[in-house]
Image: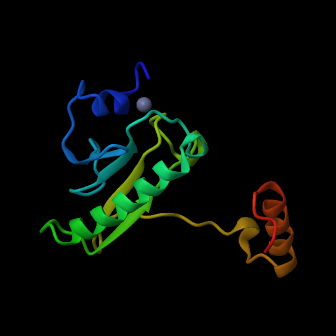
Amino acid sequence: MADCVFCSIVAGEAPASIVHRDAAVSAFLDIRPVNPGHLLVVPNQHATHLADLPAATGARMVETAQRLAATLRASGLRCEGVNLLLADGVVAGQEVDHVHLHVVPRFAGDGFGFRFPLHHGAEATRSELDAVAAAIRRAGESPQV
Ligand SMILES: [Zn+2]
């Protein structure tokens, strides 16, 4: 896609420090790393949102991230843990309109973290959870649970 920085990287038209490349996905260092070794795994074909991605490509992204997480731990870079993060949509924090899975090496005291505010400040009741689960099942493809 024109004007997509990740498409340009995949095409070799923009610089990137690439660590993996196959027929479906590429992985390279994030230019704004949370920690050294912060990687992005992207599909080679442009897709804006997770739902736009062929399932096999999504699976390949996760498989690649899984392997890279293990590689980071063995790399000599400081890596005591790993976060995988995919921001799907602007309100979720997606800043580049090309699906990308962050692989973030973590260590104690690195300052990175997530906030998990409780909805309405309390645990949900079982009936609330069951109602939400029913709505998701109705919208999905596997209603038999
Ligand atoms: Zn793109």
The structure residue drawn at horizontal position 36% and vertical position 30%, both measured from the top left corner, is: 7
Is 25 placed left or right of 78 in the picture? right
Query: Of 116 and 20, which appears nearest the observer?
Result: 20
Picture quadrant of residue 143:
bottom right
User: Which residue is situated farthest in the bottom direction here?
Assistant: 126
The structure residue drawn at horizontal position 73% and vertical position 78%, both measured from the top left corner, is: 123
Is 10 placed left or right of 134 in the picture? left
Residue 76 in view of the camera: yes
Residue 29 in view of the camera: no
The structure residue drawn at horizontal position 40% and vertical position 26%, both measured from the top left corner, is: 4
In this picture, is 88 found above or below 46?
below
Q: Position of residue 130 (x, y in %)?
A: 83, 74
Query: Of 38 and 54, which appears nearest the observer?
Result: 54
Rendered-image quadrant of the C terminus: bottom right
Rendered-image quadrant of the N terminus: top left
The structure residue drawn at horizontal position 42% and vertical position 61%, both measured from the top left corner, is: 84
User: Which residue is situated farthest in the left direction here?
Assistant: 76
Q: Position of residue 115 (x, y in %)?
A: 53, 64
Q: Which corner quadrant of the figure contains ligand 1?
A: top left
Q: Position of residue 20 (x, y in %)?
A: 24, 50
Figure disc tally? 0
